[in-house]
Image: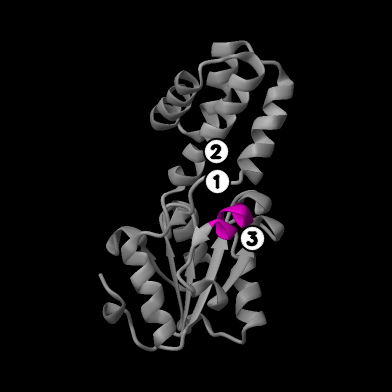
Amino acid sequence: MKYTDIDPRKTAFIFELDNVLYPEKDYLFQAYYLFAGYLEYLDLIDEKEAVNLMVDTFNEKGKDCVFAAVQKKYSLNENYKIHFNFLMATAKLPLKLLLYQNMLELMQDIIVDRKKLFIVTNGNPEQQLNKIKQTEWHGLEKYLVCYFADEVVAKPEPDVIHNILQDHNLQRREIVMIGNSDNDLLCSEACGVDYINVEQFL
């Protein structure tokens, strides 16, 4: 699917961030690397082994299980969890986050056509903002309007979309939401706007 396949009457496009505009693992794996370096510095834990453990746990069980796996393997106390969570939210990455090429081209086409770009993202607002700041936007950043759903009510609740409608004087029929989860789909249904799964672009 390409921009030209979308109803030309649409004037505003709402994107989730993680795994829609860029691969979330590109952020998490760099943060894991930084945490492993911290463990090596403090406790002489092998950095490469710790990184491999975190990446394998992410791939097999998901990101919510990563710290528990490291804590169990290396008998870490709860103070390490505080540092891990802080690092996950505020990491200064070695490398910029890169957009999916197809999504970069889609967003560029939207801007060339003088339409509006929004990011509406679930998750810790501090962490989500940190990701946005460390993404290579190729000049798109000045056109982006970002909303952190957790500051209102997380999706699938439609409150944040209602705020966008009001703040930007938009009608539901003008909007397309592009996401990758049941939360995004259910949110679009709850507020009566069209929805496209990102897989159709990727």
Structural crowding at the residue carrying mark 1, measured as other residues with C-alpha within 10 Å and reported as few (<14), some (14–19) or many (≥20): some
Label 2 crowding class (10 Å Cα cut-off): few <14, some 14-19, many 20+? many
- What secondary structure do most residues of the magenta stretch adopt? helix
In magenta stretch: residue 94 = no
The residue indicated by pointer 2 is 31
Can residue 10 be seen here? Answer: no
Q: Secondary structure at mark 1?
A: loop
Q: Residue at x 62, y 83 (%)?
A: 168
Magenta residue span: 128-134
For the residues labelled 2 and 1, say whether their Cβ atoms are less than 8 Å apart: yes
Find residue 160 and report its image quarter. bottom right
Q: Nearer the viewer, mark 3 or mark 2?
A: 2
- Residue 34 vertical placement versus 104 (above, below): above
Q: CA distance from mark 3 to mark 1?
A: 21 Å
Residue 52: image location, x then y, percent: 42, 24
**Residue drawn where x is 56% and y is 34% of the image:** 34
